[in-house]
């Protein structure tokens, strides 16, 4: 059974930092990513990383967020710096396996106050 356990969300002031982690079990991921969904908006990609380390970022977070992975621990992290109120959303971890099946975490709330 595949499980994705997210941690690290919370409340922070604008300009602050948070670090999200996603620990996967029951899967050897091909790629993992962080998505977010703000109230009334569609879920959008924030950043993704493949097992070999290739990264992809949304334009809105480039230069502020960094995604990294630990293959041995099957974990992906998202370091978020210079947070803005517009970054407020529920952040979801997504893992894709080598058969292109994908799985979602339960989500973690990130709130940035102005």
Image (spheres, grey):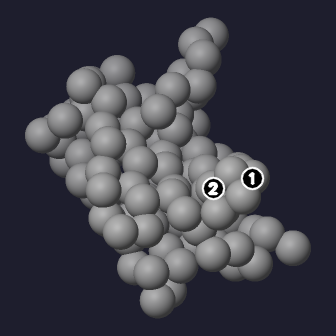
In the displayed structure, would residue 24 be above or below residue 46?
below
Give 40 or 70, whichever is nearer the viewer. Answer: 70
Name, please, the residue furthest toward the top.
Answer: 40
Dot 2, crowdedness within 10 Å: few (<14), some or many (≥20)?
A: some
How far apart marks 1 and 2 lie (CA) works out to 6 Å
Residue extending farthest left? 63
Left or right placement of residue 41 versus residue 56 in this view? right
Residue at 40% in and 37% down: 46
The residue that disc 1 covers is 101
| Horizontal and vertical percent position of residue 87 | 36, 29
Residue for point 69% across, 51% down: 100
Residue 77 in the figure: left or right of residue 104: left
Q: Quadrant of the C terminus?
A: top left
Q: From the viewer's perspective, is 12 left or right of 32?
A: left
The image quadrant that residue 14 belongs to is top left
Callout 1 secondary element? loop
Q: Is residue 104 visible?
A: yes
Which residue is found at the position 70% from the left and 74% from the top? 27
Q: Please give the label number shown on residue 96.
A: 2
The answer to whether one can see residue 7 in this image is: no
Q: Quadrant of the N terminus?
A: bottom right
On the picture, is 17 further left or further right than 27? left
- Name the spot of residue 93 as percent of width and height, x first: 58, 52
Residue 64: assigned label = none
Q: What residue do we see at 39% from left, 56% from top?
A: 49
Q: Give 12 or 62, whichever is nearer the viewer.
A: 62
Check contact, mark 1 vs mark 2: CB within 8 A: yes
- Give the quadrant of residue 57: top left
Nearer-the-camera pick, 43 or 98: 98
- Classify 38 as above or below 14: above
Residue closer to the observer: 102 or 42: 102
Query: Could you say whether the residue bearing mark 2 is in a helix, strand or loop?
Result: strand
């Amino acid at each position: 059974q595949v499980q994705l356990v997210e941690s690290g969300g919370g409340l922070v002031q604008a300009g602050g930092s948070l670090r999200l982690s996603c620990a996967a079990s029951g899967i050897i991921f091909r790629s993992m990513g962080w998505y977010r969904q703000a109230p009334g908006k569609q879920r959008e990609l924030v950043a993704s990383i493949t097992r070999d380390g290739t990264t992809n970022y949304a334009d809105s977070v480039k230069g502020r967020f960094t995604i990294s992975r630990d293959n041995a621990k099957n974990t992906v992290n998202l370091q978020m710096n210079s947070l803005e109120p517009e970054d407020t959303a529920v952040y979801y971890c997504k893992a894709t396996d080598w058969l292109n099946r994908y799985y979602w975490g339960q989500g973690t709330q990130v709130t940035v106050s102005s």
